Image: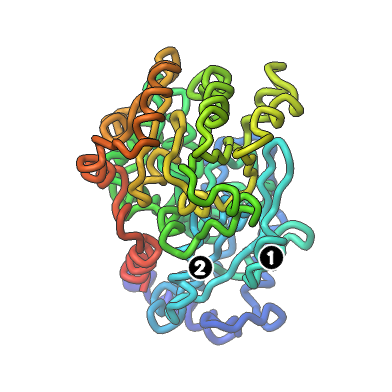
Amino acid sequence: MIRLITKLRKVVSIFIKYDKYDIGERYDPSSSFADTLIRHFYARLYQKESFDLRKQILRQYRYVSILFHIRRAIRKLNLGKIPIRIVFLAQEPCTWRYMASLYRACMSDSLFKVYVVNSEFVWQVRDDCSEFLTQNNIEYLDGLVKKFRFDLLNPDIIVIGSPYDDLRPDQHGTANLLRFAKLVYIPYGIDFADQAGKFAKQTFGYDTQKNAWRIFTRSKKTVGSFRKYGGIPSRRIVSLGLPVIDQYYLGSSSEVLPKAVQSASDGKFKVIYAPHHTMDGWSTFLHYGEHIRQLVQDNKDCYLVFRPHPGLMETLKLNNLMSEDAFRSIFVGDRSYLYEGDDYYGLFHWSDLLISDASSFLGEYAPTQNPIIYLHRDDGWGLDDTIKDDYFKSCYVAHSKDDVTTIFQQLKNGVDPMKSERKHHQENISEGIFTGGTGQRIAKYLREKLA
């Protein structure tokens, strides 16, 4: 054992002597002896289209340069004296908002060296974050065209806000990212599943979640589900709340709507209608969509913004249920507007009422402290035990068109009998739901764990 320790010390001393890689803030690959070897080894790693993720990761780590591990060990010993290198993978604007407050918290802390790498989100259409990042003066590295290589950056943490490897470029898949750093997973919206278990795996048990170093979830209620569907140990799941909730407290405003809409809706009862896209499970659009539009049409003192799930229109088209023209025509005309943007928290600030079927909005809307009509589908998937009671007890639950009409008229007239008890149940949905600050809490956690 003594001989082994002595040999390791010699290896480390040789590494420090010949490797000029700056383990602090500066990056100079041309002078890095270790980078040259690491690139040499990585170039020979065979990538298969389909693979057993665990075996693939073990294989990659088994044959990676020993200098890579040594350099990591040196960095780890010095974290706190040198910055923690944290990379945010930005796929598209909506996904970015799920981790934006953590980005801001890290940027304001000198203990973090922050990088943003542009990726893309490939679902129905291709979307990336480059234009959004540029408009918001956020510096980023190109992960698409030039395909910036993470091994050259030597990060400590990579933060991702989507569990779907098949919706990311191959170079940003879980197996590839794990070669370079620990993964931190931030759920996209309120993380819950359905009673039938259709959504459970993608919410709690995809490869991204199963291999994340830490998952930052909304509540301790979800810990059991991550363990059940992903086999993820409790120590890797941290219940500090969701950064997406911070969006409400970071200055989003109704300016996301055109001036004409703001003017026309001024003084009226403002309603958001937000149906889901799962036609066989949660969505109630075909049952209630036209009815809700007619309700607003009949009540001249109301204004409606229709904000469907981004996948709803394509789902209707693919299943030959409705054409795009027919879909868009439902919510045209007086006192109605179709909003397809990603800053829905601006809509929350504008509104007086949310109408939605099972979706993350039922929880994310809570900071407004305004009423919610939940369109429950009796023949659908239902809600899992982590969220069911909180949604049912904090929302007005409608099972029919008559229910929708009765509850709508009641709330429009200022009668809100659940107002006093609603907040109590919504507090259980997520940590910090009425205070914000989740990004700061997560940054503090990362400092304490790594520095």
Task: Residue 284 in the image: state x and y as whole percent.
Answer: 51, 22
CA neighbours of label 2 inside 10 A, class few (<14), some (14 to 19), many (20+) = many
> Residue 365, labelled with which disc?
none
Q: What kind of colouring is applied to the model shown?
A: rainbow
Q: Is residue 14 above or below residue 100?
A: below
Name the residue beneath numbered marker 2.
86
Task: Residue 70 in the image: state x and y as whole percent.
Answer: 49, 71
Image quarter (top left, top right, bottom left or bottom right) of the N terminus:
bottom left
Task: Residue 430 in the image: state x and y as whole percent.
Answer: 31, 47
Given residues 266 and 451, the one toward you in this image is: 266
Given residues 349 and 59, the one toward you in this image is: 349
Given residues 301 and 341, the one toward you in this image is: 301
Label 2: element kind: strand
Identify which residue is drawn at 43% across, 78% down.
109
Q: Earlier in the sequence, mark 1 or mark 2?
A: 1
Label 1: element kind: helix
Q: Amino acid at mark 1?
A: Arg
In space, the residues marked 1 and 2 are separated at their CA atoms by: 21 Å
Task: Residue 14 in the image: state x and y as whole percent.
Answer: 53, 82
Q: Is residue 229 above or below residue 178?
A: above
CA neighbours of label 1 inside 10 A, class few (<14), some (14 to 19), many (20+) = some
The reply to whether residue 211 is visible in this rendering is no
Identify which residue is drawn at 29% across, 36% down.
415
364 lies left or right of 415? right
Q: Amino acid at mark 2?
A: Ile
Q: Is residue 158 above or below residue 402?
A: below
Image quarter (top left, top right, bottom left or bottom right) of the C terminus:
bottom left
The reply to whether residue 407 is visible in this rendering is yes
Identify which residue is drawn at 60% across, 42% down.
165
Residue 191 lies in quadrant: top left
Name the residue beneath numbered marker 1.
39
